């Protein structure tokens, strides 16, 4: 019960961190809209298109890399955890999956390098139009866009893992287990089938 309480508290802390992160993302997106307004006003149509395509591709490639990294790590974890009793077929299937994901990850890395090169081209274009302060805002926006995407994925993964751990622990408890009042403040959806979640101050 103490472990469940500890994990639940950790989950609440992670949810608070996610709320703060989402606010940072919102602020950075607002800065991005400001930057795009400057560019739309000052640059030529083909230069505006180059900027918009670069920003759109940056989003896609970073998300693709994060997704493939996560899937590759999960397959490698399963492979390393296989016991000696695992069938050759299972091991072979996982090795093949790892090989495919590793190749896709390498392709995504090359795409990211291409996007990075385009970022330098866009920066050279914008340097002709934007003031020093505006250029710094643009660079900050682009840098934070990738950073915040990575932080969001990491937080989401930690929250998902924590929820799975709490669920497994709850399912392992005896059916007649009754927690002390206030000992558990479970996130919504993690209470047992016949229990209502214990109210939590952080539950909205």
Image (cartoon, grey):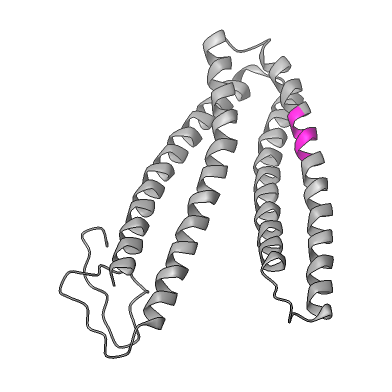
Q: Quadrant of the N terminus?
A: bottom left
- Residue located 30% across and 58% down the image: 9
- Residue located 45% across and 59% down the image: 159
From the viewer's perspective, is residue 195 above or below residue 152? below
Is residue 187 visible from the viewing direction of this image? no
- Percent coordinates x, y for residue 202 in the rendering: 25, 58
- Percent coordinates x, y for residue 93 in the rendering: 82, 73
| Secondary structure character of the magenta stretch overall | helix
- Residue located 51% across and 47% down the image: 152
Along the line of sight, which residue is nearer the eye, 112 or 71? 71
Along the line of sight, which residue is nearer the eye, 71 or 60? 71
Q: In the current view of this chain or complex, which residue is farthest to the bottom?
A: 176
- Percent coordinates x, y for residue 186 in the rendering: 30, 69
Count of numbered circles in the view: 0
Specify the quadrant of the image occupied by residue 38.
Answer: top right
Along the line of sight, which residue is nearer the eye, 34 or 168? 168
From the viewer's perspective, is residue 88 above or below residue 10? below
Q: Quadrant of the C terminus?
A: bottom left
Specify the quadrant of the image occupied by residue 3.
Answer: bottom left
User: Is residue 114 one of those drawn in magenta?
Assistant: yes
156 displayed left or right of 180: right
Specify the quadrant of the image occupied by residue 21.
Answer: top left
21 displayed left or right of 2: right
Find the magenta span and give its range: 111-116
102 displayed left or right of 43: right
Is residue 145 visible from the viewing direction of this image? yes
């Amino acid at each position: 019960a103490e472990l469940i309480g500890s994990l639940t508290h950790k989950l609440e802390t992670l949810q608070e961190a996610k709320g703060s992160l989402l606010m940072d993302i919102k602020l950075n997106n607002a800065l991005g809209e400001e930057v795009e307004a400057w560019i739309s006003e000052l640059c030529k149509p083909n230069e505006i298109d180059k900027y918009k395509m670069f920003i759109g591709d940056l989003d896609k490639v970073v998300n693709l890399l994060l997704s493939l990294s996560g899937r590759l790590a999960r397959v490698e974890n399963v492979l390393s955890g296989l016991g000696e009793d695992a069938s050759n077929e299972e091991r072979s299937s996982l090795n093949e999956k790892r090989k495919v994901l590793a190749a896709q990850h390498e392709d995504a890395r090359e795409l990211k390098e291409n996007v990075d090169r385009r970022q330098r081209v866009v920066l050279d274009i914008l340097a002709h139009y934007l003031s020093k302060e505006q250029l710094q805002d643009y660079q900050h926006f682009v840098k934070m866009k990738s950073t915040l995407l990575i932080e969001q994925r990491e937080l989401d993964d930690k929250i998902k893992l924590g929820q799975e751990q709490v669920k497994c622990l709850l399912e392992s408890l005896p059916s007649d287990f009754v927690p002390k009042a206030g000992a558990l403040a479970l996130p919504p959806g993690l209470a047992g089938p016949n229990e209502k979640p214990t109210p939590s101050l952080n539950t909205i």
